[in-house]
Image (cartoon, rainbow, N blue to C red):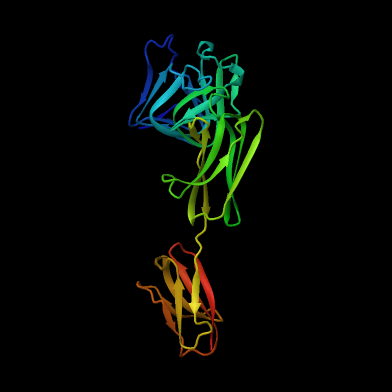
Amino acid sequence: MKYYLLFCQLALLCSFSATAQFTAGTEGFYISAGTDVSIDGLTFRPTTAFSIQNKTLTTLPTALPGSPPSISRVYTFDSPITFVGRLGQFYRTSELNGNIETMLQVVYQNVAPVTKAGSVVNTTSHYIYNDLIAPATFSAVTAAQPGALPVTLLEFTVKMEGSAASLNWSTTYESNSDYFDVEHSTNAKDWNTLSKITAAYQSSGLKNYGFSYGSPSPGANYYRLKMVDKDQSYAYSTIRELSFEHTYQIALYPNPVVEKIQINMDHWENIATVKLLNAQGITLLEFHKKPLLTEIDMKDLPAGLYVVQLGLNDGSVASVKVIKQ
């Protein structure tokens, strides 16, 4: 059974002499898209349906470290959640912890804290939120002003440019920032560094960065930024994904052919069928039982133009013309 929440507000504690906790069991809470939900002052408005299951949320007065540190209200889940939509929180002025209220930004943390620029602060109700347009994974949420972390990331985008991946990102604030590691993965778990980009060190204005990767892998490609400070503390950006079509190297030889033509292709295990067609598109020969033949006997066929057609496991087709002498 799912519990549909229209609005859930747990009362804020008068003091933090005790720890505030909220637990969602195995059936959990289901939040429909566009619905505002508040749990002990932590608010969600998911872009798509969102559920909290098998999680314990703890509210603590211990700030995340920084200069200045975060506000003295930190929401921590016992295991990470992934969320896209409006993420916000209520706080007291007594919890600002040296931060200037009008400069606050939403901060979320999984491995390391990430400050989200563009947050909206209501100084009357003492509420802050940020609309996360891409899924973010985190186990802690709080707020801090720029300077608490080395980099305030405004945006990070990836897009295809031909056969290359074009990565672009911008910052609105940098303090003691050292460099960005541009990281790549094919499974979103194992990462390797593609390039090390020098950061601005100190900046309070817009800074733009870019990188082009010319050797993406066939299929899914994942990219993220590791933002490293001068003291080697770091934070990760949101993960971005691009998908590239599979490309194959196919060779037929000899071509022109007199008797038998050999088919040479990398990743032969991806081939499902082999066909020989004449110039009118009529199938003359077809092989679909494994192991597939890697040569075709054409000695008894009349001279002319033919097509060798390879059907791939993913449903795509590769065709190569061959001339019979």
Residue 308 x/y as whole percent? 49, 77
Circle count: 0
Q: Tell me the quarter of the image containing the N terminus.
A: top left
Residue 271 x/y as whole percent? 42, 68
Residue shown at 57%/42% (left/top)? 197
Q: Residue furthest front?
A: 231
Residue shown at 53%/27% (left/top)? 149
Residue shown at 52%/90% (left/top)? 302
Residue 80 x/y as whole percent? 41, 32
Quadrant in the picture for residue 269: bottom left
In the image, residue 323 above or below residue 183: below
Q: Residue furthest left?
A: 26
Residue 278 x/y as whole percent? 53, 82
Residue shown at 60%/15% (left/top)? 123
In the image, residue 296 above or below residue 235: below
Q: Residue furthest right?
A: 205
Does residue 237 show up? Answer: no
Quadrant in the picture for residue 263: bottom left
Which one is in front, 293 or 237? 237
Which one is in front, 295 or 26? 295
Does residue 314 show up? Answer: yes
In the image, residue 287 above or below residue 313: below
Which one is in front, 59 or 255? 255
